[in-house]
Amino acid sequence: MSEEQDKPKLIPTKILKCKDAECKAWVREELAGAEPACPICKGPMHRSIRHLPALQNKIKKKKAEKKELF
Ligand SMILES: [Zn+2]
């Protein structure tokens, strides 16, 4: 019953893919800069979706919206 821990959960993640079909480069959209360019050929990129394991270091939740406590 513990299979879930062995398989990383894949979630649809926004990515940017290089427009050049021969260039396989891609980056997570959230890690791309304001002017995303292919890290390999510096060419234009376009949005896509890829199923990726959830980022472990994104667990931290922002506490900015807890104004109701005051
Ligand atoms: Zn490229």
Image: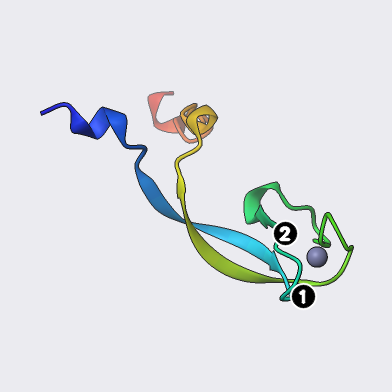
Residue 10 on image: x %, y %: 38, 48
Colour scheme of this structure image? rainbow
Residue 51 on image: x %, y %: 45, 56
Residue 23 on image: x %, y %: 76, 67
Q: Is residue 36 left or right of residue 66?
A: right
The residue identified by callout 1 is 20
Q: Secondary structure at mark 2?
A: loop
- Comparing 47 with 8, the one in front is 8
The quarter of the picture where the C terminus appears is top left
- Ligand 1, image quadrant it occupies: bottom right
Q: Amino acid at mark 2?
A: Ala
- Comparing 34 with 4, the one in front is 4
Q: Is residue 9 above or below residue 14?
A: above
At 65% from the left and 56% from the top, the residue drawn is 29
Residue 66 on image: x %, y %: 44, 30
Q: Amino acid at mark 1?
A: Asp
2 or 1: tag closer to the N-terminus = 1
Q: Is mark 2 within 8 Å of ligand 1?
A: yes
How many other residues sit within 10 Å of disc 1, few (<14), some (14-19) or many (≥20)? few
Q: Quadrant of residue 27?
A: bottom right
The quarter of the picture where the N terminus appears is top left
Q: Secondary structure at mark 1?
A: loop
Disc number for residue 4: none
Q: Is residue 51 above or below residue 57?
A: below
At 17% from the left and 26% from the top, the residue drawn is 2
Q: Is mark 1 within 8 Å of ligand 1?
A: yes
Furthest-right residue in view? 42
- Comparing 25 with 46, the one in front is 25
The residue identified by callout 2 is 25
